[in-house]
Structures are given as structure tokens and as C-alpha cells.
Image (cartoon, rainbow, N blue to C red):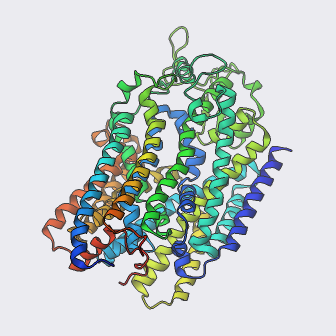
Amino acid sequence: MSVQAWTFVLVGLSFALYIGIAIWSRAHSTSEFYVAGTGVSPLANGMATAADWMSAASFISMAGIISFRGYDGSVYLMGWTGGYVLLALLLAPYLRKFGAYTVPDFVGDRYYSQTARIVAVVCAIFVSFTYVAGQMRGVGIVFSRFLEVPIEVGVFIGMGIVFFYAVLGGMKGITYTQVAQYCVLIFAYLVPAIFLSLLITGNVVPQIGFGGVDQTSGTFLLDRLNDLHRELGFAAYTSGEKSTIDIFFITAALMAGTAGLPHVIIRFYTVPKVRDARISVGYALVFIALLYTAAPAVAVFARTNLLNTVSEQPYSEMPEWFSTWEDTGLISFDDRNGDGVIQYVGPEARDAAGSPIENELTIDQDIIVLANPEISGLPNWVIGLVAAGGLAAALSTAAGLLLVVSSAVSHDLLKRSFRPDITERGELIAARVSAGLAVMVAGYLGINPPGFVAEVVAFAFGLAAASFFPAIIMGIFSKRMNREGAVLGMIAGITFTASYIVFFKFIDPSANTAEYWWFGISPEGIGTLGMLVNFAVALTVSRFTPAPPPRIAELVERIRVPRGAGEAHEISA
Amino acid sequence: MTLPPDRRAVSGEGYWRKNLTYVGMLLVVWFVISYGAGILFVEPLNRIRLPGTGFPLGFWFAQQGSIYVFVVLIFVYVFLMNRLDREFGVDEDAE
């Protein structure tokens, strides 16, 4: 069967599965819609969290970024997994004990303030939409490349599927679909990784294989890759170019951002007990680690393969995948010296006479994972599987994010702020309508992506790190933290972080170099400083303003011990 | 809350302090492995190789080792806290 036939079959089967689950798991109450009735087993929640968390960025882009940046790509590996340690130790069990439906719910109640709630709602909606746009773009790319339908049609199909199970099943439908999506995506990621590892190193475990011996050259694969990099004028693969302080701050921003992202946090509201919340973070990280430890291996295999395939080879002899990806514009060749041979070189490349060699090949990092099976000549069904996996990753994350938006509107804005007298039935309808609207906005953003999607992802993490993370931590660990401190802290953190990013990304992009950055911290890492600003402002302000009322101290006492989690569900205002 | 108020205060205090100690210890390991071995000391560690492999040690910590350690840290925390919950009678089994 052809690649396209296999892709149709595998994508079609996976979609049929998601729809079947959606019909089986419809939501009948707001509790089921928002938190799946808190009846999800820790293991299932771990899988759902892994799918919820691993987006098109993790599945499609991450190995590619690492492949091009080598050691510098480690920030994503450590940042996007280390955050789970913070989540398990500092957030998840307490938030489960608190027993709310949304993240703004916690912020609003703990800081006895509608202002705090609204600030949290705005942050949650902004962060989630930013993220969703990227997912829908991923869906569009996969459809247009593998099924050769226009990007718009691809996005419509994706929207239709998400609409079906998110609107029908809410968190309940999303949870069980995500469990299925996790299985699809991890299988789709590991199969090619194992194939590649066997081909290149003869080791069946990719995580070990990339530290092993390259079968063609007989030297360690990483040494071979470093040599290739040196010959072609790239920085050494295992060392990287970014400054230590920047790596440090980016990693910290990604970790705190991960722990503060609302769509991840709400997953831990869905389990029955505090103890389940703790262990399910552990399961989630195991499931995530399966992909995250394979990604750097895939990156090394792909990089070696790519350099061997294209470097100094005649353009006319390029394999078929080269021209199909050229058509999508994700790979482009410009024969500057007119010799018909591809020079793919780094900035330090010199010829025998010592004069610089010009690079002629531009490759988008997103194609590394998607084109890898073709580059290595793996069977057609593996290529179709990768397409199904990429879609699973993008759709599962999109659904989780859309639920955050819908519950922020129907629960936090309507029920808890403007229409407290709304009935259970009315709230459920409002939740469904806002989920439906959110899907449409997401689809629009996917078809007409704002030109700055990549840039705003830095925003999402920076903002979550500078706003939610400190507010929630202090809400649990400090009884003295009051409304004034938390609100001003969040506002200071967000304003600081957003201004820095907006300045370097939009107002003066030409100044976006290490020379002009404060302390050498790039906009990607500034969320860490924003977080420290938030903590500093909050702690200072709370000293000079009245302590929170006694009922808040009792609330904090209560969330610190596990017993009694079942009772505290529908919280009184 | 099922415990009487006075006992709750006493047990709550000791329980919370122990919890903070566990969290503090585990976060020290978390920091040393990721920010220490994977970032601040990555260059000197890269001069050593993980025995029998092609991995420079610092690079390995940044791209593999730190993730394995994170997983272990969470399971250790779960074990310690479940034990602590039972010790102070605040676990959820009795409910």
C-alpha cells in the first residue's frame, strides 16, 4: 500500500476510536463536564496528562529543535519534565484537596477577591488560546503533507473531531480520548525511533543506542556527529552555543511555566483522592519520559542521517522525500555557487583555501520527526503511523486547552462572578456553548495563524511562570499571603515579563541579541525573573497590608492535610 | 475535618514540618541534578564519559539522567508522604 493509503487507514481508524469513546463517555453534570466527576483512576489520569501535556510541539518540533541545536535543546527536555517534580511536590496534592473546578477558582477563593479571580481568568484564556493556535497549525501541516488536502480542510476536520468529544463529553470525554491518544502517539513515536536505533547502532533501545557505536564508521555515534559538525562548520553537537545563564533561566521558566499551566493543573482535579493526585503525577512523568528520553536519541539519528544524505551530494540525485517537502516550503535549496551540489554548512565553514563557504540549504526543524521515516527509508505504514501520532498529540492538547477556556467562561465568569444564580443545567449548557465557540476561535487561528505563533509560545510559559505559579505556591505555603500581595504580585510579574518579551519580539527585534538583554537573559527565559519579581512584590506588599481573614487561615490548614478530600467539592463562596 | 480541633493543630504542625523537610531535601536533589550537573557544571563533567558509552557525562545528565532522576524523586515523595499520612492519621483510607 502507498504512504497515502496507509495514512488514510491509520488516521481514519484512530479518529473512529476517538468518536466511539466520545459517545460512550458523555457528561451529564457540571462536575463530569469540568473534572470528570473526580472518578478517574490515577493510572488513566497519568496517561491522559501525558497526552494533554505532549502537544504538537513535543511530538513534531522538539526532536527537530534538539537535532539542530544539540546541547542547547536540553532546556526543553529538562524544563518540560522538571516542572512535574514541582507539580508533584508543591501543587497537585493541595489543589486536589482544595477541590475546585478551575485554576481561577483556587486563586479567587484563596485570595477572597473577585479581582484576583478575573486576573486569573484573563491569564488562563490568553495562555490557552496562544497554545491552541500552535496545535491547530500542527494539525494543518500533518493533513496537508500526508493526506494532500488543503490546510483549511485539515483544520476543519480536526475541529470537527475535537468539537464532537469536547462539547459532548467535557472533561470526561476528553480524559478517555486522551488515554487512547496517548497510546497512539507513544506507539507512533517509539516505532520509528526503535527502527532507527537498530539501523544505525544495532541497539534496540534508542535511549541507550545513541550513546553507542555507529555501525558504519565504528566510532561512537556522538563522536562521529561532533566530527561531522566540526568539518561542516557547526558548533559541536554536545556543547552548544547559548550562555550558561541563559540556559539556566530558560530551563527555570519552562519548569515553573509547566507547573503553572492551567490545562495541566486541572488534570489533577479529576482523581478521587489526594494520594491519587500525588501518584498520578508520577505516572504522568513516566509516560512523558518515554517520549522525552527517546527524543534526544531521535534527534541524533536524524541529524546524522540528514548530514550523510544531503551534504555535498548532487541536487539532481536527491531522493523523492526531498522534493515533496520542498513543495511544502519547509525545505529549500538555493544553489549559490552554481555547482549543482548541496552545500549544507554552518557559519564557521571554510574551504581548503580558508575562505568562507556559503550555506545553500534551509530546513525547517518541524520536518525532522515527520520526514525521518522517509529519510531513513522505513516502511510506508510507519510513515502513516507518524501522521496519526502527530494528530493525536495536537488534538489531545487542543481539547485540554479548550476545556480551560470553556470552564473559565461558564464557571468563573458566569457562575462565580456575574450570574451566581445560574442553574446546574444552565451552567452545563453555557459550558458546552463556550466549548463550541472556543473550538471555532481555535480553528480560525489555525487557518489564519497570527505570524507570531512561535514567539507567543514563549509568552505562554513566561506568563504562567510569572503569574499562576507564584500565586498558587504562596497560597499554599504562606498563611500570611493576602489579597493585596497576590494581586499586585501577579500584575507586576505579568507586566514585567510581557513588556520584556513585547519589546524584544515586536518593538525592537533588531536589539534581540545577548548584548542588549538584561544579564544576558533572552525573552524565552525572562519568565524566571518575572517570577522572582512576583514573589518579591507579593511578599513585600503583604507585610504592609492587613492579614487575610481567619477563615482563609483555616482554609490553608485544611488543604495541607489529605484527609477529607471527598467532602470539599462544591465550595461555598 | 474528622479530627477534633486541638489534636488537629498539634498533629498538623508536626506533619507540615516533616512534609516541608521532605520537599526541601528532594528539591535539593532536583536542583543539583538538573541545574548543577546538567547546566552549571556541564563543561567539566563533559570531560568525563559515562563508562562504556559515547555520552559525555554532563550532556547525558542534561538529556537523559535528569529525567530519570525526576521520575524517581516523585515516587520517593509519594512513598514518604503516604507513610507520613498514616503516621499522623491523616490518610484517606479511614474515610
Q: Nearer the viewer, residue A296 or A284?
A: A284
Horizontal side, residue B15 vs residue A398: left or right: left
Is residue A109 rendered to the left or right of residue B9?
right
- Is residue A164 placed above or below A277 in the rendered structure? below
| Residue A206 placement (x, y as % from top left) | 60, 34
What is the x, y in percent for residue A488?
Answer: 25, 66
Q: Position of residue B94 (x, y in %)?
A: 41, 73
Q: Nearer the viewer, residue A75 or A135?
A: A75
- What residue do we see at 41% from left, 56% from top? B78
Return the residue nearer the eye: A534 or B58: B58
- Quarter of the image that includes the C terminus of chain A: bottom left
Taking the image as drawn, is residue A228 in sight? yes
Q: Is residue A3 above or below residue A549?
A: above
Q: Looking at this view, name the residue that lies furthest to the top.
A: A353
Q: Residue furthest right?
A: A1
Please give the name of the residue rendered at 39% of the width and 44% of the height, measured from the top-left corner.
A251
Q: Quadrant of residue A320?
A: top right
| Image quadrant containing the N terminus of chain A | top right
> Which residue is drawn at the image coordinates 49% and 70% (left, top)?
A272
Question: Is A220 above or below relative to A184?
Answer: above
Q: Inspect this view and state whether residue A479 appears.
A: no
Which x, y percent locates residue A504?
38, 47
Q: Nearer the viewer, residue A373 or B15?
A: B15
